[in-house]
């Protein structure tokens, strides 16, 4: 019961789309049970997945103070979230990575910024569109090519949504079509 | 006859030197509809305005069409439908909707499809006006016909050639229906001069 590694690891990915002013536009949590190459951190692959969530839960309790200071980033309250305690940690990691992303953006003008930040078992990969919209993906495993293709597809889907005359700029994307297509793309690449 | 119409339509489209980028066209029309919605705030009214705009376009468009196509008088309403779909739509929008004809059950054996009540339905498999468009909930509930300008255009053009028709959408893929269809019903032939003045 206790200890031992689960044979089928469910890798979760968290995607956030942000406007140039860092307003949250869209978020998605995707669970993939694709076989992934072993993670860079040997520690996390040896921990059963329930314990990493437990750790995250502890971290939430500990970081009660720091998430308050992140409050100015947390307009994410307007975005509909899934349940779960470690949701806050995920958000905190995503928000914290924004600073790193801006730094990297100054140096590197490519769109796909690969992994910009690491937090315990979470790697943060970013993609910045020419219009300065940021796509942030939190993931556990290394999957550069898949993530690059995923980001590119999300970019195309997002452009198509922007062309909808009924979509107002910088507001959360509510289109069901967009949502289902992003999910399908996530299933394909992640 | 219909192969001829297809060829004519194709030629006119190819012969046009001034074409416009389809995305720009769709974005412009989309912005127009969204602005109308903001101004009128009532979807039925927006439908009416789109129809009015289409009517104004149609009354002028017919001249352009007749000049380029040199098609003579249509023998009956059925032929009108064929020409509209194969030459009209093709030469202006580069799409060829399919036409299905129907009419009221004939009261006498000599009834042709020239009587009031004759109608045809245009089924559009692609709609260049509605690229990228997704209707929000309120528009769906409010009964917006996004491409209603087309109905106005049909009404306007046909009125200029002595036919009073009623054109309206019966289904729209934007609304979640299976297909996009416009029904054009002949009300009567206009014998006298077309009355001048706003509708």
Image (cartoon, coloured by chain):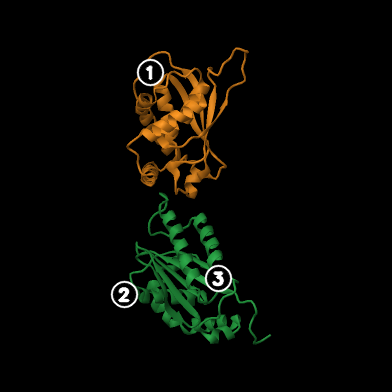
Chain colours: A green, B orange
Q: Can residue B18 be seen by looking at this rendering? A: yes
Do callouts 2 and 1 point to residues on the same chain? no
Which disc, if any, is residue B139?
A: none
Do callouts 1 and 3 point to residues on the same chain? no
Q: Chain of mark 2?
A: A
Q: Secondary structure at mark 3?
A: loop
On the image, the x and y values in percent for residue B14 come to 39, 35
Report the Cα–Cα distance between label 1 and label 3. 66 Å
Bin the neighbour count of mark 2 within 10 Å (Cα to Cα): few under 14, some 14-19, many 20 and up.
few
Bin the neighbour count of mark 1 within 10 Å (Cα to Cα): few under 14, some 14-19, many 20 and up.
few
- Disc 1 designates what residue? B194
In the displayed structure image, the side of residue A29 where residue A78 appears, left or right: left
Of the two numbered discs 2 and 1 in the rendering, the one whose residue sits closer to the viewer: 2
Of the two numbered discs 3 and 2 in the rendering, the one whose residue sits closer to the viewer: 2
Q: Is residue A44 above or below residue A109?
A: below
- Disc 2 designates what residue? A107
Q: Can residue A67 be seen by looking at this rendering? A: no
- Disc 3 designates what residue? A83
Q: Secondary structure at mark 2?
A: helix
Q: Is residue A44 above or below residue B56?
A: below
């Amino acid at each position: 019961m206790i200890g031992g590694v689960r044979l089928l690891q469910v890798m979760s990915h968290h995607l956030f789309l942000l406007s140039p002013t860092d307003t949250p536009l869209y978020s998605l949590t995707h669970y993939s049970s694709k076989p992934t190459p072993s993670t860079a951190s040997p520690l996390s692959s040896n921990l059963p997945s329930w314990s990493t969530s437990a750790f995250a839960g502890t971290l939430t309790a500990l970081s009660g103070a720091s998430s308050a200071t992140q409050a100015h980033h947390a307009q994410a309250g307007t975005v509909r979230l899934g349940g779960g305690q470690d949701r806050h940690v995920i958000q905190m990691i995503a928000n914290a990575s924004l600073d790193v992303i801006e730094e990297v953006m100054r140096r590197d003008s490519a769109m796909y910024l690969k992994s910009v930040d690491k937090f315990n078992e979470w790697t943060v990969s970013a993609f910045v569109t020419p219009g300065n919209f940021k796509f942030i993906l939190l993931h556990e495993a290394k999957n550069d090519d898949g993530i690059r293709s995923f980001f590119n597809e999300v970019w195309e889907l997002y452009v198509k949504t922007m062309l909808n005359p009924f979509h107002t700029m910088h507001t959360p994307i509510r289109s069901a079509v967009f949502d289902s297509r992003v999910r399908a793309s996530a299933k394909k690449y992640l | 006859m219909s192969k001829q119409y297809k060829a004519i339509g194709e030629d006119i489209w190819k012969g046009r030197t001034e074409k416009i980028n389809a995305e720009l066209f769709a974005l412009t029309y989309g912005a127009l509809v969204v602005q109308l919605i903001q101004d009128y705030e009532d979807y039925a009214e927006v439908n009416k305005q789109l129809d009015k705009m289409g009517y104004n376009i149609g009354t002028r468009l017919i001249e352009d069409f007749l000049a380029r196509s040199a098609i003579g008088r249509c023998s009956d309403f059925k032929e009108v439908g064929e020409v509209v779909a194969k030459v009209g739509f093709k030469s202006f929008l580069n799409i060829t909707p399919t036409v299905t004809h129907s009419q009221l059950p004939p009261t006498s054996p000599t009834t042709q499809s020239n009587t009031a009540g004759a109608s045809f339905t245009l089924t559009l498999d692609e709609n260049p006006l509605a690229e990228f468009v997704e209707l929000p909930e309120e528009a769906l509930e409010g009964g917006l016909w996004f491409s209603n300008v087309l109905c106005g255009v049909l009404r306007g053009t046909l009125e200029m050639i002595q036919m009073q028709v009623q054109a309206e959408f019966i289904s729209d893929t934007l609304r979640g229906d299976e297909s996009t269809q416009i029904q054009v019903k002949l009300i009567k032939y206009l014998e006298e001069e077309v009355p001048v003045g706003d509708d």
